[in-house]
Amino acid sequence: MYEVVSWEEVHKMSLELAKAIGDSVDAVVGLLRGGYVPAHLIADALGLELYVMRIKSYRGIGKKGKPVVTLPLIGNVTDLRILLVDDVCDSGETLSVAKKFLEAYSPKSITTAVLFKKPQCSEEVDLWVKESGNWIVFPWDASETLREDPSVKGALEEALGVELDILGEGGGSGEA
C-alpha cells in the first residue's frame, strides 16, 4: 500500500525535526536523493551549513540492493556535531552505511533524523516524525512511481495537486 506525501507535509515534517534538534548540531548532511529536500529545509530553518552525500540502494519500488556510496561527502565535518538526514528509514542499512562513512571524518557526534521510520528499521534513529509500514511516495518520487505503477496516478495527482502527464504514456523517450 502507498502513502503519498505532499510538499506541504514534507515542509511541516522537516520543520518539526528542525524544532526538535534545536541548537544541538553544527551542520546538516543530507542523503541524496530522498534526504536532500528535508535536509535543506532543516538546514535553512536552523541557519546551518548543508552538506550532501549519496548512497544508492533502491532500484525501483521494493527492489532493494546493497547500499553503496556513489557520491562521497563534499565538505569537512571534522569536530562538528552533525545531523544526518534521510527521508525514510526502511531497513536501516543506508543510515548504517552513511554513519560508518561519516565516522571517518571524525565528527564530534552524529545525530540521525528521518521523516518516516518503518517498523523493520534496524538502525537506531534519533529523530523521526512518523512511523509507517507503507511504501512512502514523496513529491520527488512521483514520476518514478507512476512509471513503475500507473495505478497510483489518481492518488498522486490528488495529493500533489498537479497532473502527471508531462512524460506521456510509458515515460520519457529522450526526444524533444
Image: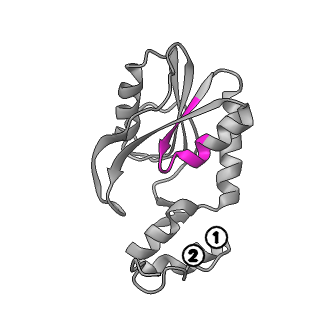
Q: Looking at the image, which is closer to me, 15 or 74?
A: 74
Amino acid type, label 1:
Ala
Above or below, comparing residue 25 to residue 28 in the picture:
above
Q: Where is mark 1, residue-wise?
A: 159
Report the residue at 34% width, 33% height from top.
97
Callout 1 touching callout 2 (CB < 8 Å): yes
Above or below, comparing residue 153 to residue 27 in the picture:
below
Image spot of residue 154 (x, y percent): 56, 80
Q: Is residue 33 magenta?
A: yes
Left or right: residue 16 compared with residue 67: right
Q: Is residue 118 magenta?
A: no
The range drawn in magenta is: 28-39
Left or right: residue 93 compared with residue 83: left
Gap between marks 1 and 2, in whole Å?
6 Å
**Furthest-left residue in view?**
66
Local packing at callout 1 (Cα closer than 10 Å; few below 14, some 14-19, many 20+) is some
Report the residue at 44% width, 68% height from top.
144
Question: Secondary structure under badge 2?
Answer: helix
Question: Quarter-wise, where is residue 156 in the image?
Answer: bottom right
**Furthest-front residue in view?**
176
Q: Where is mark 2, residue-wise?
A: 155
Question: Secondary structure under badge 1?
Answer: helix
Image spot of residue 157 (x, y percent): 60, 76
